[in-house]
């Protein structure tokens, strides 16, 4: 791609602080696991929120490739390839790398050490009670054969959030228990430190915190029931036509149920004409509106939303070196902040090596306090 590339024209940098700097800026941490293409559930649940926040607050978007390995360890090359695909999705929907920092989790080793330290503040029982973890375990059919990394997912996420000193975390409703567990860790850490060490964060839900899949279940890449942001028009049409409506609505003249109707859930999320959607609901309830006509409207709405995203994605895909560069820059910047947090946390656990005297000042009694008062002459002579 030539110099007209939106990516190559600018160097990623921290959000600017102009005349409105007096207004307190939140620190935002959000992200996704690179396990496949982002879909409309991600767009409704968090991407739209990120677009709104990126020019108002200090936002970091983390590509959580280490967490993706917790249930994809047998497919590491797929995870690696999806890192770039995820970055393309971000940029295609309008994430501005000059306003938002995009970082790769595996490029920040401080996160792994924070996770290990935080594990000392969490019990296995508490992890198993986490409703999000329990739901995902059931969804994947792990039973008791749970990968340890998957069970520890909430602690890893707490490391991500606190490493950025985040105060605001845009999430879907299913991620609320993760935020709660992060704050539990922050409070336990502050108790150990005897002072407030890291800020607690609060969740920010979108207007559509949980969009269903086309079959009415949770939208999921693994279930194949979601519409990808990069989906071709024929893919979108096929998914819309397969959407669950009201099984009792056999003819257009029959009264139908709006509640639980996936088509209306998507219209509520993406149709900008709110008044018309309300009229369609009234017509459907009393009878006189067929599912085919309803789905055609949704196809038009989704095409208007996704067409420019597809075009921009194709343009950006031709300049992968520029995208890799902004990822390296964003990762390095995020690592600087994480390193400062890790220093503070290590001090709480008395792991600050700079306080340990070395050389002649560190005598035998200091190194081996259990020997104080004992005659070790014979022991040393026989070593």
Image: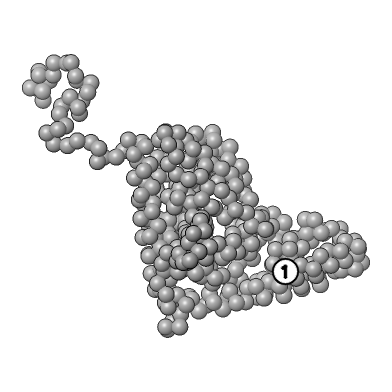
Decide which of 194, 36 is in the foreground and name it: 194
Location of the N terminus by quadrant is bottom left
Residue at image point 36% right, 60% down: 332
Residue pictured at 52% horizontal, 65% vertical: 55
Residue drawn at x 36%, y 49% as measured from the top left: 340
Quick check: 353 left or right of 165?
Answer: left
Considering only vertical position in the picture, is 288 above or below 157? Answer: below
Question: Label 1: how many residues lie within 10 Å, few (<14), some (14-19) or many (20+)?
Answer: some
| Rendered view: 109 above or below 243 | above
Whether residue 129 sits left or right of residue 338 in the image: it is right
Pinpoint residue 360: horizontal percent, then vertical percent.
11, 33
Residue at the far left: name it: 381
Tell me the residue that label 1 is attached to: 271
Asked if residue 343 lies left or right of residue 313, the reply is left
What secondary structure is found at the residue carrying circle 1?
A: loop
Depicted 375 relative to depicted 85: above or below: above
Quadrant hosting residue 283: bottom right
| Residue 333 visible, this orientation | yes
């Amino acid at each position: 791609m030539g110099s007209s590339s939106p990516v190559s024209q600018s160097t990623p940098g921290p959000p600017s602080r102009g005349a409105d700097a007096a207004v307190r800026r939140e620190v935002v941490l959000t992200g996704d696991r690179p396990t496949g293409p982002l879909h409309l559930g991600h767009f409704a649940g968090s991407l739209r929120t990120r677009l709104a926040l990126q020019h108002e607050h200090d936002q970091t978007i983390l590509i959580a490739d280490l967490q993706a390995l917790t249930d994809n360890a047998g497919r590491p090359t797929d995870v690696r390839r999806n890192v770039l695909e995820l970055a393309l999705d971000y940029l295609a929907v309008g994430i501005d790398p000059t306003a938002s920092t995009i970082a790769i989790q595996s490029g920040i080793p401080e996160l792994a050490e924070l996770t290990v330290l935080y594990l000392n503040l969490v019990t296995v029982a508490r992890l198993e009670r986490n409703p999000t973890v329990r739901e995902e375990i059931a969804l994947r059919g792990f039973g008791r054969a749970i990968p340890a990394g998957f069970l520890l997912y909430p602690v890893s996420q707490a490391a991500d959030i606190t490493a950025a000193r985040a105060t605001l975390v845009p999430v879907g409703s299913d991620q609320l228990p993760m935020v709660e567990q992060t704050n539990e860790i922050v409070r336990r850490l502050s108790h150990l430190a005897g002072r407030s060490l890291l800020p607690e964060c609060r969740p920010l839900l979108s207007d559509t915190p949980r969009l269903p899949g086309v079959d009415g279940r949770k939208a999921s890449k693994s279930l194949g029931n979601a519409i990808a942001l990069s989906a071709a028009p024929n893919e979108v049409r096929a998914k819309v036509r397969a959407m669950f409506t009201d099984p009792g609505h056999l003819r257009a003249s029959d009264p139908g149920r709006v509640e639980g109707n996936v088509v209306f859930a998507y219209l509520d999320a993406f149709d900008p004409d709110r008044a018309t959607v309300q009229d369609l609901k009234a017509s459907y309830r009393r009878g006189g509106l067929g599912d085919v006509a309803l789905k055609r409207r949704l196809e038009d709405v989704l095409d208007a939303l996704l067409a420019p995203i597809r075009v921009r994605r194709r343009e950006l895909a031709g300049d992968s070196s520029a995208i890799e560069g902004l990822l390296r820059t964003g990762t390095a910047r995020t690592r600087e902040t994480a390193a400062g947090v890790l220093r503070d946390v290590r001090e709480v656990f008395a792991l600050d090596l700079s306080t340990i005297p070395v050389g002649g000042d560190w005598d035998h009694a200091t190194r081996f306090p259990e020997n104080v008062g004992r005659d070790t002459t014979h022991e040393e002579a026989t070593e």
